[in-house]
Amino acid sequence: MDKPHKKLDVWKQSIALVTVLYELTKSFPKDEWYGIVNQIRRAAVSIPANIAEGAARQTKKEFIQFLCIGRGSISEIDTYLEIAQNLGYLDNSTVKDLDRKMIGVDKMLNGLIKALKN
């Protein structure tokens, strides 16, 4: 079976982001495991999963739709990280580093969306 998503740099970078977020959330309080930790992880996994699903679709329009869902998941993570920082679970430098990684993935998604539209 051909797996077109595995050829995409944005998919690879989003997998790396998932890995970082999983490692980071291991240090969150136990009472957050079914709250914010679960939400961050689900949103993170959604990014490469939507890229993969979209890449396997029949039309560019469908692919673009799944890429946009991935972009939405990045915004969702950004919100959860803001909350986690406000609660004292993350320091400012960690959030800035994660923000740079998310911006990188978001820019790659935007670029792929633009390329598919042309």
Image (spheres, rainbow, N blue to C red):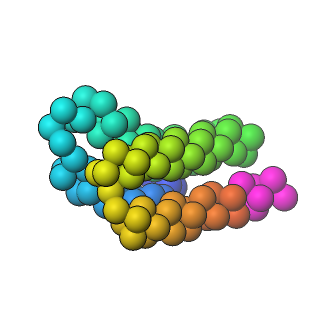
- Observer-nearest residue: 27 or 8? 27
Q: Is residue 95 left or right of residue 71?
A: left
Relative to 23, residue 63 above or below: above
> Visible in this render: residue 33?
yes
Across and down, in percent, residue 66 comes to: 61, 40
Number of marks in picture: 0
Q: Please name the residue shown 59% across and 42% down the image.
A: 72
Q: Please name the residue shown 39% across and 52% down the image.
A: 85
Q: Please name the residue shown 46% across and 67% down the image.
A: 96
Across and down, in percent, residue 39 comes to: 37, 35
Q: Is residue 89 left or right of residue 53?
A: left
The furthest residue to the left? 30
Q: Please name the residue shown 64% across and 64% down the image.
A: 107
> Visible in this render: residue 13?
no
Across and down, in percent, residue 38 comes to: 30, 35
Q: Which residue range is magenta in the image? A: 112-118
User: Quarter of the image holding residue 113?
Assistant: bottom right
- Observer-nearest residue: 47 or 61? 47
- Considering the image in quadrants, where does the C terminus appear? bottom right
- Observer-nearest residue: 117 or 98? 98
The furthest residue to the top? 34
